[in-house]
Image (cartoon, helix red, strand yellow):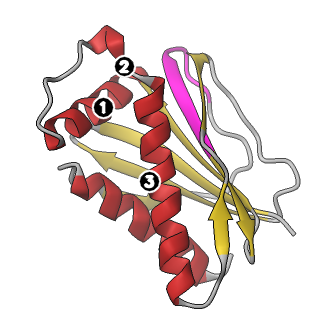
Amino acid sequence: MERGLADAFTAAVEEVLGEIGLEVALAVSPELTVLESDSGAGFIATVGIVGDARGSLLIRMDRQTAGNIVAAMYRSLGLENPEPDEISEAAIAEVANQICGRAVTILSRSGLACDITPPAVISGTDLTSSLPGTLDLERRHVHGSFGTLQVFLGLGN
């Protein structure tokens, strides 16, 4: 994958999570086309990328991590923290939307014209997903006191 594309998404993750008060550490992981599953409940948020670059951004997290991110979002807005069992899929979708939107803004500065599709969120247990038709895949683990995100950027032709 072209470094500029992957770096734009990495920067977007750091910026968006930082803006809601979360410190992050990134780790590049071996390339895989299947997201690992676990036995706990979790979420997969996905946003499509269209234009000069085409593909998908998938962000996978467990329920605890999602709750911590949503709580940080609420705090950053001066709102009362939600109850742990009231995690909003809409808030998780908004995080994915902000990350992908920020990345395409960064890419536009280097001359790539991209847009994003509306986010989708899937929740459940033993979640797995794949990125069929992906020619190039970048995988990052994002760690912090909030938990761990698995971030996949898959680009097609």
Q: How far from the left and from the top, in percent, is residue 134?
A: 82, 58
- Would you say the residues marked 1 and 2 are in contact, meaning their CB atoms lie under 8 Å apart? yes
Q: Amino acid at mark 1?
A: Val
Tell which of 18 and 131 is nearer to you: 18
Camera sees residue 9: no
**Left or right of 70 in this view: 105:** right
Instruction: Give the numbered dot on residue 70.
Output: 1
Estimate the spatial distance between the alpha carbons at disc 3 and disc 1, rounded to whole Å: 13 Å
Q: Is residue 41 magenta?
A: yes
Estimate the spatial distance between the alpha carbons at disc 2 and disc 3, rounded to whole Å: 18 Å
Q: Secondary structure at mark 1?
A: helix
Residue at 40% over, 70% down: 11
Tell which of 87 and 5 is nearer to you: 87
- How many discs appear? 3
Dividing the picture into quarters, in which one does residue 136 lie? Answer: bottom right
Dividing the picture into quarters, in which one does residue 24 lie? Answer: bottom left
Q: Amino acid at mark 3?
A: Gln
